[in-house]
Image: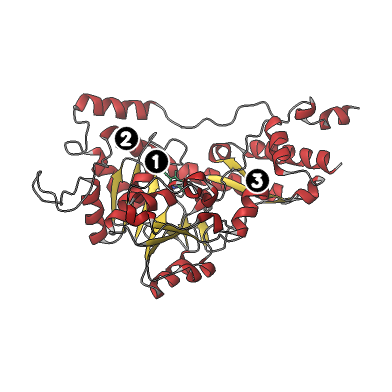
Amino acid sequence: MATHAREKLAIDGGAPVRTKPWPPWPVFDETEEQAILDVVRSGKWWSVEGTRVREFEQAFARFQDAKYAVCVTNGTAALEVALRAAHIGCGDEVIVPPYTFIATATAVLAVGATPVFVDVEEESLNIDPAKIEEAITPRTRAIIPVHIAGCPADMDGVLEVARKHNLLVIEDAAQAHAAEWKGTKVGAIGDMGCFSFQASKNLNAGEGGAVITNDEHWADQVWSVHNVGRVRGGRWYEHHVLGSNFRMTEFQAAILLCQLRRLPEQTERRTRNAQKLSEMLSQIPGIRPPRPDPRVTRHAYHLYIFRYYRDAFGGRPREDFLKALNAEGIPCSAGYVPLYRERVFLNRPNSADLCQLSRLKDYSQVHCPVCERACAEEAVWLYQNMLLGDEEDMADIATAIAKVQRAFAG
Ligand SMILES: *Cc1c(COP(=O)(O)O)cnc(C)c1O
């Protein structure tokens, strides 16, 4: 009887596996409070007078194995600034994966260019280099590989195609602070890399972003676009290119300097816990934990994405599983839909640019089967803050999933 009571699912009125709260996010203490107070009292609240943005740019570039970083307002802006810096615009095509946050593709629209979707790899859900070449046309200018969940994309594969066709590589590393491909941190492995410091991200200032690069030319172009077309060393009222004001405040940089010091230890903890969780989940029928490519020397685990195979769960759809697991006290979700299925692409984007409108694709004809199956049936997301717990927290996740599996399988 006791066993039966324990086994009754929480959605059916049983006791949930877990009622304890998960580790909070963001993580902060008096260090952050003092840093903000210092900026307030200095009276220097913008980067033109203050020193925090510059200091953070140097620290973040160094941390991420890059020579240069330019801080901007957010990750979406970082992508737009990088594209504009490369003079990508109307008539140009940019290759993107469909399994990502909307900004990866809408940044391309925002500069007047056309996003072209290429399906993802089965294992990593990152862009599949083997499928890029067939999407290249004479208009293709760039590829945006996304390191989704914090797992580096196959940069060897992407760079090989890019070099062969003379394309730029702009990494969307918005989820991949501290992530490494073959021992090098991501972001400046391609030509430019874009980061987000939005509230959910592993490095967080509420909002914020950065573009990093190893190329001085790109660093200067990015700097100009983010600073209303000014040039480094130029006069205040001297504007060479079309830019906008994408500058970060000193408040954001002050927080980021504190958060960056916490990041290495947090990354270690997420890695350790993700490995433990994967060992436990690999014992459960119908669950496939993430198995990063051996060339991924650091997965940042912004998300922990595992796969759900309904055959081992009595044929029950993933939505039932998500409801049951949430009820057991384990927060989880289904994640993205393929971006080309979003209304913004199915309706014609609200572009005022006639040149662009004439060149947009009919996105209802796009099919990326690997992405579609992951989105519709298989992918399950857990969140980075859950990985900041301990081994018992990981055991709770595994216990709850195993309980749902036994109940569904009957
Ligand atoms: C968060 C995110 C962005 C956008 O960053 P914001 O700072 O929210 O504008 C872009 N791409 C990916 C993959 C993201 O996860």
Q: Which residue is identified by label 1? A: 197
Side (left or right) of 387 relative to 64: right
From the top left corner, tell me how far across and down residue 28 is, in percent.
Answer: 42, 30
Q: Which residue is identified by label 3? A: 277
Q: Earlier in the sequence, mark 1 or mark 3?
A: 1
Nearer to us in this view, 357 or 393: 357
Kind of residue indicated by mark 2? Gln
Which quadrant: the N terminus?
Answer: top right
Mark 1 Cβ and ligand 1 under 8 Å apart: yes
Label 1 to label 3: alpha-carbon separation? 26 Å
> Picture quarter containing residue 12?
top right
Label 2 to label 3: alpha-carbon separation? 33 Å
Q: Which residue appears at 35% of the width and 43% of the height?
A: 209
Pointer 2 with pointer 1, Cβ within 8 A: yes
Q: Residue furthest right?
A: 1
- Residue 288 visible in the shown view: yes
Q: Which residue appears at 30% of the width and 28% of the height?
A: 36
Label 2 to label 1: alpha-carbon separation? 9 Å
Q: Which residue appears at 38% of the width and 44% of the height?
A: 75
User: Closer to the observer: label 2 or label 3?
Assistant: 2
Residue 8 vertical placement versus 345 (above, below): above
Q: Earlier in the sequence, mark 2 or mark 3?
A: 2
Kind of residue indicated by mark 3? Leu
Kind of residue indicated by mark 1? Phe
Mark 1 packing: few (<14 Cα in 10 Å), some, or many (20+)? many
